[in-house]
Every structure is written in structure tokens, then in C-alpha cells.
Amino acid sequence: MGENRYRAQLIIEEVGKAVIGKEDILKMIMTAILAGGHILIEDIPGTGKTTMALSFSRAMGLEVNRVQFTPDILPADLSGFTVYDKESGSFVYQPGAVICNLLLADEINRTSPKTQSALLEVMEEHQVTVDGNTYKTGVPFIVIATENPVGSAGTQLLPESQLDRFMICVSMGYPSVEEEIEILKRGQMAEKVSDLVCPVVNAAELTAMQKEVREIFVHDKIFSYIAELAKATREDEWTELGISPRGTVALTAMAKACAWLKGREYVVPSDVQEAFLPVARHRIILNMKAKVGHVKVEELIRRVLENVPTPTMKSKR
């Protein structure tokens, strides 16, 4: 376990060579990858979303496909299609972009709802169905998607069913003055991500790390705590839609990965609290009362964490 944890830290350090600052976000994305989830990075243009996604794909040494989503991208571009082979007299499957280990979906909310829905099956089941035949993706399979905020020119709202399939949603935010100065200095060198970041793991090693994370122990008190947090989001006066059961499964997986990165073989309440915001922020939909009162999702999440009692875990002696 120690050697794999060292590899995880190496990935974060490699990505840090291309992405200045944002250590907390780097760690959270790495946590989601270890938990076997998909990542949505949302922010305004020019804050480094694509650079971060490319850096992770490079550092993990996986088979990567990148799709720049536009209104004319078709579902078949993602899932693949069959063509008639004259020589063999049969139809042959031509793999789409999702047949890989890591799919970088750039500006995912710029494409049509029909194309967005083509990702639903592959994100949940790691397979695509084309003309009645099923084709598996690579192992592991991760989607890292970037999107601009709703309201930006040419964007469309992602459906709740697709948002729910992303394990976490993170926001980059503007850099500090010191970080921006460093970005300007590096810009003079004009180095590409491929020059800065080197592969430090392969697909087999990443799969082994994910297996160790799944084996982390979760006490019944922690399961109860997660269920109570989810219940609180559903019953809050500001909520129209709370965390789904898929969301609680994602929160459990994230808490396990948090514990694993900290060198523990069991989950404690602080692991759940650390993962709660990125897991919940894109799943909770505020009602009209909250919108009129200019309430933010982050404020609701903070209130839920304060109101739900934290379980006490007795240490063994």
C-alpha cells in the first residue's frame, strides 16, 4: 500500500509542474480518480481547466482520447459506428472516442443534448452498445470533462442524469497575484504540457491503487452519517433536489480514497466532510425560495454539515 500511495503523490507532483497553485484541487481530482469516478471541472474560460485535465492524462500514462465538444459533434463520434466491409461481406465496428482509458471531454456543455446523452451508458457501465452489440472501454476508464458556466455563449445545461454520473465537480477559480506572476514567467518559456509532465504510472498500477481503495473499511456509523447527510440535503427548505443514492455511493468511495491517501485503512468522519462539497455541489438543485434569497449551494452544504451530528469513533486500545 505504501508504494502505491507514493505513486499517487508522484502523480500530484507531476501535474503540479504544469498547474501552478491549486494543490487542494489537484488532490481532490486525484482522490476521485482513485475512487474510480469521473471528474467535472467547471469555471470561466482561461483558468486552466484543460491544462489540468491534460496534465493528469499525461502523468497517468493512459490511453487518452480528447474530444472538443461543439454543436456538430454526433453521438457516433463518441460511441463509434459500424461500416460495411466489402471484402469480408460483413459489418465492421469502428471504435469511437470513448474506447480508451481516459476521455478528455473539453467544453462538454457546448454540444447538443443528444450527444451528451451518448455518454450516459459508458460513464455508468464502461461499455457502449452499437447496433445491438456491446463493446467495452479500457480498464480503468475515467472521464475528465470541462465546462464553462451556464450562461456563457453557446453553452447548454447538462441534464441532471449526466451531472449525477460525475463523482465530483470542482472549480478552478482565479489564481492569486503570486501565482499569476509565475504563470506569466512560465509563459515566456512556451513549454507544452507534454514537455513539463512525465508519465509516472501505467494502467495496471492505477487499477491496483483503485483496488486498494475499495478495500478500505467503513464502519456502520460512517454509513449512517453519510445517509443522514444525504437526507438533510433532500429535506432542507432551500432544496428542490437533494443528493441521490448514486451520490451517497460516490461520497462513500471518495471518503475511502481520502482515508487511503492519508495512510489509514479505515474511514473517519473528517474524510466524509472533506469530500462532501465536491461530491454534493453539482447534485443539489436549489428551489425558488433559495434563488430569490441569493442562497448559494456552498452555503447550503455548509449548513448541512453543521446541523448533522458528527459520529464519535472510539479508537481501539
Image (tube, rainbow, N blue to C red):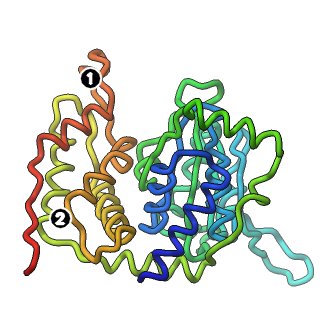
| Residue 299 visible, this angle | yes
Q: Which mark is residue 223?
A: 2
- Mark 2 or 1: in front is 2
Q: Nearer the viewer, residue 23 or 172?
A: 23
What quarter of the picture does the N terminus occupy?
Answer: bottom left
Residue at label 1? 290
- Residue 18, percent from left and from top: 67, 52
| Residue 133 visible, this angle | no
Question: Left of 191 or right of it: where is 129?
Answer: left
Kindly identify the residue that appears in the image at 56 percent across and 81 percent down.
205
Q: Nearer the viewer, residue 121 or 311?
A: 311
- Residue 20, percent from left and from top: 61, 46
Kindly identify the residue that appears in the image at 48 percent across and 82 percent down.
3
Kindly identify the residue that appears in the image at 43 percent across and 62 percent down.
31
* Secondary structure type for disc 2: helix
Residue type at tag 2: Phe
Question: Left of 29 or right of it: where is 83?
Answer: right
State the CA–CA distance, disc 2 to disc 1: 29 Å
Question: Left of 170 or right of it: where is 250?
Answer: left
**Would you place residue 269 above or below residue 187 in this image?**
below
**Would you place residue 304 above or below residue 237 in this image?**
below
* Secondary structure type for disc 1: helix
